[in-house]
Amino acid sequence: MSGGKRCPDCGSCEIVEDSHYSQDQLVCADCGYILSEGTLTTTQTEESFLQAVTFTEGTRQNETISRTKLRGIVRVRNLCRVLRLPDSFADTAVSYYERAFYLPLCHAVRHEKKEAVMGCCVYITCRQHRWPLTFGTISSIIYSSYELVSSVFLELVQALRLDVPSLSLQDLARSHCQSFRLFRDCASAPKDYAEDLDKVLERTLQLLELASETWLVTGRHPIPMITAAVYLSWQSLRPAQRLSCSLPRFCKLSEAELPSPTTIRLKELKECSLKLASQLPWLKMLTINNKTVVHHLGDILKHQGYLLRKALEAVEMSSMKTGEGESPEQLQPCASFLPPCVAKPRKRRYATAFPDGEQEVDGDEEISDSEIEQYLRTPAEMACYQQAQARLHT
């Protein structure tokens, strides 16, 4: 380090001596600005006469960096420092930004989109190194919208042709649990509310595994599901003292955000646990609801493999009985697990064929020759139709 000198570009005092092509030069360690360029000699004649040749003249390369690109590099490194990433992550993110800087993605665009490009370079680096990070974290750091960051991410991956691995839900849950204040040394927390991080994390991972087996994770944002799983796991460790604590109060005490779908995810997890609790032999004599099921969450997670197999057998038995002639209404409801989009589909608004009532249909209209083939039935279809009619009249 060279004392007393300051970088003219960023004002930093971190000036180091860098040996570039066997020549010493002063470089700013924060922004990369070259304060004094080294000298090179090209021929023996020049060495004998001590004639110095600068690096630019000797290599015919221009080492100057535009101020816009330099600001972007500094911004990327600052984002890595805020996230406390290793130095190797920052170097990789800077290399991605330097490649993206010359693409149309970074030219003639708004400042907000340029910030999104820098954030996506850091996000891609973290994903490639299996470092748990979400779009929501990047969006909050760069003060950008979630939709803009996700769209820039897709454009950047396609333009640079990068391989981005999928995000591990378990790793993301570990990092998210560490941000809850109740799982650290919290002296201001109410009595019996503070909990050991390892215990909550172990039960949360088991609950997320159960959620993934019952189609509750597929196609969903991970943070609301993780928050609901953490809250339910925290409650189940000491249900007598913590059932009165609501989800918003828990997030407020933990100084954690409460995404809007978290309440729905919590309800789905309780419904799933309630279905599995009905399969436990020692709980069949008890009346269990969405509140009391928290007391038995430990037993449910301990035997979740057995309970899921029992639920699958119940579904198969019900389908066999339905095929033998019994109506679905006569069968007992079984603990079946379907994707939420199938179990509870959204109600779609269908347009009325004749909204103003201008045309009335009485069934005596003529059918054209092109449509009449759609109404003809095969003998097998007619036999099925007659059987269905006979069952209705009996």
Image: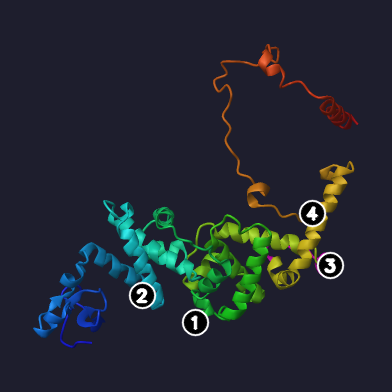
Which callout, 2 or 1, points to the residue nearer the camera? 2
Comparing 328 with 35, the one in front is 35
Comparing 194 with 169, the one in front is 169
Which callout, 4 or 1, points to the residue nearer the camera? 4
The amino acid at mark 2 is Arg
Residue at 69%, 52% (x, y): give it: 338
| Rendered image: mark on residue 281 | 3
From which residue to which does the magenta span run? 281-291
Q: Is residue 162 left or right of residue 41?
A: right
Residue at 21%, 67% (x, y): give it: 61
Is 282 a magenta residue? yes
Quadrant of the rendering where the C terminus is positioned: top right
**Mark 1 → mark 3, Cα distance in angstroms:** 40 Å
Look at the numbered disc 2 and give the secondary structure of its residue: helix
**Mark 3 → mark 4, Cα distance in angstroms:** 15 Å
- Image position, residue 131 (x, y; %): 48, 71
Res. 13 visible in picture: no
Q: Which residue is mark 4?
A: 334
Q: Which residue is mark 2?
A: 81
Q: Looking at the image, is 173 positioned above or below residue 275?
A: below
